[in-house]
Image: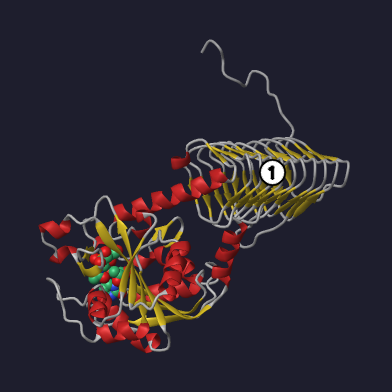
């Protein structure tokens, strides 16, 4: 076990100096029916292309090339903006493809880059479910033999749309036939080309110049290079993929949804393996990379996104949304709570329907209840904002009680101002704090007050008009 693990780690760490990964992402993606370039459609919160880049990065390649064409500018700027977030440290080179005449033309456009390397891994830009482990395995097997090319083949329940792998009687690879060029017998073959390959760079380059256009659209098929390489007496191997779902190509919105569901299920089962309790694992939406502690209990309909970290023994009720936040141990998040870019310490309780906007910090044991909104504020240890309040730009101490309907008036139409509420202050219902304003520790603020001036420690402030009662001015009972 340890040896196996070590080998895996080693594979990850040792940079393969002669390996270049080339990702084909220039295609039109017509079947998506969307102005957004296909590689930028999201699966579990990040673009399809980001999943492919992350897997490629784990191989430690000397360079990653991305062929761009349709929507090139958009793709290039999205990738540049995401590289750090996705942990891509290998040099990334963008290669423009102008003719868009097929997957082989895309590779041809990259020849000046490919010439610098011995081994080229080519990946379609629309297979977000590929696993780094499988790619590493392919690269190892390729390195171990004197091969011309290796292609990842999988048996799928429904091969429609994919290129079929044709084998000779002895099982050896013969060629790939695309769906559009396949006869009825070929269409019955369930072993398909995943669109992931490893090539000997020289053999690939030699094959590319021999290609002729094929099919109804007269395209140059990358898949045809494999038969040509075989004709050059260089062995071509079909590497049998461990899980056909890794090869799912996203060509339509239905396939996008399918990829999303498969990845969500993968994340959910990994979390359950680590001891997280998911009541209905197919009905939670947790991004890859989210960390959750043991025995945290998560109900259906929750979205847990981005760089969120959640502690152990938390209870997360239905339809809770959490993005880029840190949640401590033993926290209860009741139904409908919404949390963004915030920190919630251990033993806090939120909701139902609490809203933490960015840069909110809840200290240990704090409570934020029904329909309360917190923005860019600190809620001190054990303090409570339980009902219908807005607290923005506020520093609140420990042991504070905020009455129902209390509002910090932080915005004067031009600027935002701070409210400071000292430890153990007791704020009655429906108070307005007109910021900038400070109320010190152990103060009491009368219900309905509009506080505009500093309140010293241990004092009571009441800022509302006195009650007047005028007899017989009400409604006459018998009128
Ligand atoms: C391709 C394979 C098919 C395989 C399937 C796996 C070819 C000819 N066929 O079919 O055997 O089973 O993938 O998913 O390769 N691209 C460019 N420039 C172009 C055309 C395409 O960069 O001019 C890129 C696309 O952006 C895409 C990839 O190449 O990432 C594959 O193109 P796509 O049109 O999706 O090919 P498929 O028909 O799915
Ligand atoms: Ca495809």
Q: In which quarter of the view is residue 3 placed?
A: bottom right
* 123, 367: nearer the viewer: 123
Position of residue 333 in the picture relative to residue 99 (left or right): right
Q: Position of residue 399 (x, y in %)?
A: 80, 40
The residue drawn where x is 58% and y is 57% is 307
Residue occupying the point 38% across, 54% down: 243
Above or below: residue 180 compared with residue 286? below
Residue 23 rendering spot, x and y as whole percentages: 38, 73
Q: Count all numbered tags in the image, as a single digit.
A: 1
Q: Nearer the viewer, residue 232 or 71?
A: 232
Considering depth in this image, is 191 or 309 the residue closer to the camera? Answer: 191
Quarter placement of the N terminus: bottom right
Can residue 343 be seen here? The reply is yes
Q: Which residue is mark 1?
A: 329
SS at badge 1: loop
Q: Position of residue 385 (x, y in %)?
A: 69, 40
Query: Is 158 placed left or right of 48 in the picture?
Result: left
Q: Is residue 123 above or below residue 407?
A: below
């Amino acid at each position: 076990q340890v040896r196996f693990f070590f080998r895996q780690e080693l594979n990850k760490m040792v940079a393969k100096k002669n390996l270049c990964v080339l990702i084909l992402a220039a295609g039109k993606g017509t079947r998506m029916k969307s102005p957004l370039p296909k590689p930028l459609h999201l699966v579990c919160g990040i673009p399809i292309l980001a999943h492919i880049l992350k897997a490629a990065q784990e191989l430690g390649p000397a360079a990653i090339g991305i062929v761009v064409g349709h929507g090139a500018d958009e793709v290039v700027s999205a990738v540049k903006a995401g590289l750090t977030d996705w942990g891509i440290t290998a040099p990334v080179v963008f290669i423009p493809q102008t003719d868009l005449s097929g997957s082989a033309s895309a590779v041809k456009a990259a020849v000046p880059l490919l010439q610098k390397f011995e081994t080229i891994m080519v990946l379609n830009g629309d297979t977000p479910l590929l696993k780094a482990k499988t790619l590493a395995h392919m690269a190892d097997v390729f390195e171990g033999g004197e091969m011309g090319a290796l292609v990842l083949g999988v048996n799928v329940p429904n091969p429609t749309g994919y290129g079929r792998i044709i084998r000779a009687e002895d099982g050896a690879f013969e060629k790939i036939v695309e769906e559009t060029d396949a006869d009825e017998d070929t269409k019955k073959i369930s072993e398909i080309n995943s669109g992931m390959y490893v090539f000997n760079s020289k053999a690939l380059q030699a094959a590319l110049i021999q290609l002729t256009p094929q099919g109804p659209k007269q395209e140059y098929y990358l898949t045809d290079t494999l038969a040509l390489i075989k004709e050059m007496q260089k062995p071509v191997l079909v590497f049998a993929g461990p899980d056909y779902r890794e090869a799912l190509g996203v060509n339509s919105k239905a396939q996008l949804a399918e990829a999303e569901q498969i990845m969500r299920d993968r994340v959910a089962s990994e979390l359950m393996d680590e001891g997280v309790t998911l009541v209905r694992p197919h009905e939670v939406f947790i991004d890859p990379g989210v960390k959750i502690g043991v025995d945290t209990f998560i109900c259906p309909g929750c979205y847990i996104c981005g760089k969120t970290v959640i502690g152990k023994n938390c209870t997360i009720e239905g339809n809770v949304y959490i993005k880029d936040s840190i949640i401590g141990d033993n926290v209860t998040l009741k139904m409908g709570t919404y949390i963004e870019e915030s920190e919630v310490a251990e033993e806090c309780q939120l909701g139902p329907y609490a809203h933490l906007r960015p840069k909110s910090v809840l200290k240990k044991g704090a409570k934020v209840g029904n329909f309360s909104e917190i923005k860019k504020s600190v809620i001190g240890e054990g303090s409570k904002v339980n009902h219908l309040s807005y607290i923005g730009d506020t520093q609140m101490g420990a042991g504070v009680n905020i009455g129902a309907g209390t509002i910090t008036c932080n915005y004067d139409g031009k600027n935002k101002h701070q409210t400071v509420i000292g430890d153990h202050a007791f704020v009655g219902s429906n108070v307005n704090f007109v910021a900038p304003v400070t109320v010190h520790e152990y103060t009491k603020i009368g219900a309905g007050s509009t506080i505009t001036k500093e309140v010293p420690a241990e004092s009571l402030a009441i800022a509302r008009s006195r009650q007047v009662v005028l007899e017989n001015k009400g409604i006459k009972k018998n009128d």
